[in-house]
Image: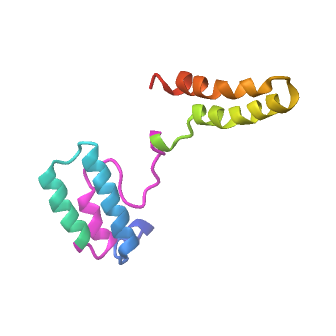
Amino acid sequence: MNGVKEDEGVRIGTAEREEAQELLSRQFSEGRLNPDEFSERSAAVAAAVTRADLAPIFADLPARPGEHRTPDIAHQRDWRAVVMALIPLVALACTIVVPHGWLAWLALPVLGLLLYGRR
């Protein structure tokens, strides 16, 4: 008997149900479920007792509870945010080292517009 079949009988708790509900909500928001399907499956998640109870709810969906998912685009580090975090350090260095270096602070809003203005 392999480990997958043995795990199906394991009882789930509140944390697993919440994870399953969050995943189901994401599938709904991405357009994979209509409102009626989402409602039915949400009720089934709330009533689930074991991992085996969750399996048919997610059988036709690309991600299942407990699987490692690739990070969402929104959670990936945005290089522009890193640049905007470093600019004040450069401006501070300019203020200390260069005469009239305080003018470097004027670059912050300009760089913000250049980096984020055309999203």
Decide: is 41 above or below 1.
above
| Residue under the image location 44 percent in, 26 percent down | 119
Q: Position of residue 110 (x, y in %)?
A: 59, 23
Q: Which residues are magenta?
A: 47-73
| Residue under the image location 85 percent in, 23 percent down | 99
Which of the two residues, 111 or 78, is positioned nearer the viewer here?
111
Q: Tell me if 47 is positioned left or right of 62 in this view.
A: left
Q: Quadrant of residue 7?
A: bottom left
Decide: is 90 above or below 71.
above
Q: Residue furthest front?
A: 100
Q: Quadrant of residue 16?
A: bottom left
Colour style of the rendered protein structure: rainbow
Q: Residue furthest left?
A: 36
Q: Position of residue 64 (x, y in %)?
A: 35, 56
Q: Is residue 11 magenta?
A: no
Q: Tell me if 54 is positioned left or right of 69 in this view.
A: left
Q: Position of residue 104 (x, y in %)?
A: 72, 25
Q: Position of residue 88 (x, y in %)?
A: 70, 35
Q: Quadrant of residue 66?
A: bottom left
Q: Tell me if 97 is positioned left or right of 119 in this view.
A: right
In which quadrant will I find the N terminus? bottom left
Which of the two residues, 85 or 105, is positioned nearer the viewer here?
105
Give the dominant element type of the magenta stretch: helix, strand or loop: loop
Decide: is 42 above or below 101.
below
How many numbered callouts?
A: 0
| Residue under the image location 30 percent in, 69 percent down | 52
Q: Is residue 64 magenta?
A: yes
| Residue under the image location 47 percent in, 54 percent down | 68
Which of the two residues, 104 or 52, is positioned nearer the viewer here?
104
